[in-house]
Amino acid sequence: MDKKTINCHELQELLEVNTDVILLDVRDEEKFLAGSLQANRAGAINRPYTRMKETQEPLDEATAKLWKDKPIITICTSGNKAGKAATLLQEHGFQAFSLEGGLTAWKAFESSVQE
């Protein structure tokens, strides 16, 4: 798949049918701890983009083996860092996509769905 982004509606559909989706919050730990995307089954995992780009491999070896064949959705506040992180992961062979509009878009989407 050449597509590098996923919108909120597509993510919701993916989460409903695929329990192996990895939600990867690429914001700094402080922002992550203040709140992140929570899906029906589990919350996001934090791996700051700043740390990912500082190393030769964006993920440690054990994590990379576990995640190699699973879709990874990168998320941040607005989608900018998530896009860079998804590209970096794709360059290392992962199925990575960034959430368009980030958590800002997700929160707006969630409130529109609940109305």
Image (cartoon, grey):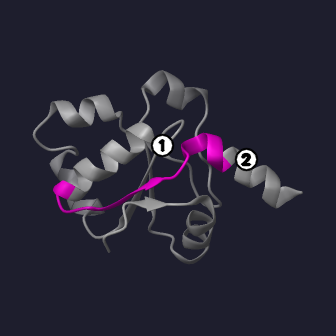
Between 59 and 111, the one lying in front of the other is 111
Q: Amino acid at mark 1?
A: Gly
Q: Which residue occupies 57% across, 54% down?
A: 42
Left-right relation of 74 to 31:
left
Q: Are marks 1 and 2 in contact (CB under 8 Å)?
A: no
Residue, far top: 30
Residue reaching furthest left?
Answer: 56
Quadrant assignment, res 20: bottom left
Q: Residues within 10 Å of mark 1 (few under 14, many from 20)?
A: many
- Identify the magenta region: 91-106
Q: Which residue is mark 1?
A: 79
> Callout 2, which amino acid?
Ala
Q: Residue at x 37, y 67 (%)?
A: 3
Residue 54 picture location, percent across and down: 17, 30
Q: Quadrant of residue 8?
A: bottom right
Q: Secondary structure at mark 2?
A: helix
